[in-house]
Image (cartoon, rainbow, N blue to C red):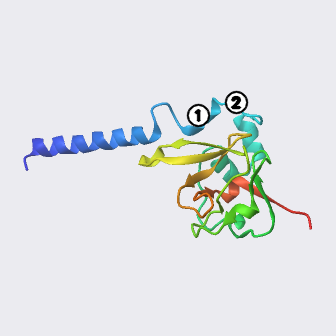
Amino acid sequence: MDSNRRRLLLAGGAAGFALAFIGSRGLGGSRAEAAATETFTVTHTDAEWRKLLTPNQYAVLRQEGTERAFTSPLNDEHRDGVFACAGCTQDLFSSKTKFDSGTGWPSFWRPLDKAVLERTDSSFGMTRTEVRCSRCGGHLGHVFNDGPAPTGLRYCMNGVAMTFKPVAA
């Protein structure tokens, strides 16, 4: 292969990669920037969020990070109770809808009414449905169509983005 053709192929590949990367991140900035333009009941400045949350909670809730699989104690939480947003304490999921998905993250087949917002997430070259707290806009995880009955959904949540409130005995 001659050097001009090789350069053309390499340049085309680099351009294709750049377009794929831009497409995966969107031209309008990050999802966090888009969420920042929305109005939520609970709001704080970035500095306030950093003071209120642990570094891991901040990375997930405010920067759309993902905790490592099988690291959250909430993955093994089996008591009756409610899983709430670590950012604003809003109740999100009932323990009655939790199931072991085998993925390493707390999974649920349905959120509580009006507890979460869902939006399209096309980052990293794939299309998924992102799940956020409806009260503070914190990133919780994603929902997939491979869950159990009755909904067939798997709300795959970051445990660090939630707290657990057990039912009083």
Q: Position of residue 139 (x, y in %)?
A: 64, 46
- 76 lies above or below 111: below
Kind of residue at disc 2: Thr
Which mark's residue is nearer the viewer, 1 or 2?
Answer: 2
- Residue type marked 1: Glu
Residue found at the very far left of the displayed protein: 2
- Which of the two labelled residues, at mark 1 and mark 2, occupies the earlier sequence position? 1
On the picture, is 85 further left or further right than 66?
Answer: right
Dot 2: element: loop
Residue visible at 34% across and 40% down? 18
In the image, is residue 154 above or below residue 34? below
| Residue name at image x 74 percent, y 48 percent | 53
Q: Secondary structure at mark 1?
A: helix
In depth, the one of 77 and 19 nearer the eye is: 77
Q: Position of residue 8 (x, y in %)?
A: 17, 40
Q: Quadrant of the C terminus?
A: bottom right
Above or below: residue 35 compared with residue 159: above
Residues marked 1 and 2 touching at CB (< 8 Å): no
Residue underneath mark 2: 39
Q: Residue at x 58, y 57 (%)?
A: 153
Horizontal side, residue 128 vs residue 90: left or right:
left
User: Closer to the camera, 169 or 138?
Assistant: 169
Q: Residue at x 63, y 61 (%)?
A: 150
Mark 1 lies on residue: 33
Residue 82 place in picture, x, y as percent: 79, 58
Q: Nearer the viewer, residue 63 or 158?
A: 158
Single out the residue that lies furthest toward the right: 169
Category of crowding for the residue at label 1, using alpha-carbon neighbours closer than 10 angstroms: few (below 14), some (14–19), many (at least 20)? few
Q: Nearer the viewer, residue 115 or 138?
A: 115
Q: Left of 39 or right of it: where is 103?
A: left
Q: Position of residue 119 (x, y in %)?
A: 57, 41
Disc 1/disc 2 C-alpha distance (Å): 12 Å
